[in-house]
Amino acid sequence: MDLGLIIQLVSGAVGGNVAGSLIKKLSLGTALNFVIGILGGRLSGQLLGILGMGGAAGGIDIASIIAQVAGGGVGGGILLAIISPVKMRWLSHSINIKQPYLYDTRVRLQKTS
């Protein structure tokens, strides 16, 4: 297995979990954050490789490793930020509940005289 692929997958998993822990509204649980982060890390690695910025040549120099770590981590966080609201919105419609960060559920009580 390619070292660059392993770096992208691991940094994507870390990026997904870090994004989920920093922004609690985005967290889907550790397992889903992990899986979505891995997918995001791989997708961002492919995209950066196509664009020629991800060290796609398989080099093991420090610049390509840093680019793969940064790309994988950011890609994992971004994919989590995209999928989490979509999943929560779909879930809220399927079981007919409102999520507090998608809808304003605060009710103001009026004083009756």
Image: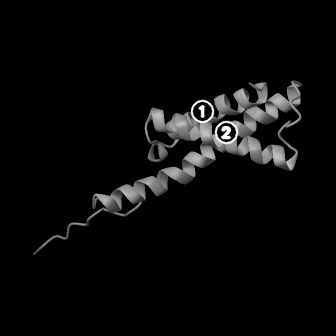
Say left or right for 43 vs 84. Answer: right
In this picture the colour scheme is: one colour
* Residue 65 seen from this side: yes
Q: Are marks 2 and 1 in contact (CB under 8 Å)?
A: yes
Which residue sits at x=86%, y=30%? 58
Q: Residue furthest front?
A: 1
Q: Mark 1: which amino acid?
A: Ala
Say which quarter of the image contains residue 52.
Answer: top right
The secondary structure type at the circle numbered 1 is: helix
Judging by the rendered image, the residue that carries numbered circle 2 is 41
Height in image: 88 above or below 20? below
Judging by the rendered image, the residue that carries numbered circle 1 is 13
> Residue 103: where, in percent of width, then height?
38, 63
Which residue sits at x=61%, y=36%? 38
Say left or right for 6 vs 27. Answer: right
Say which quarter of the image contains residue 66.
Answer: top right
Which residue sits at x=31%, y=62%? 105
> Residue 110: where, in percent of width, then height?
19, 70
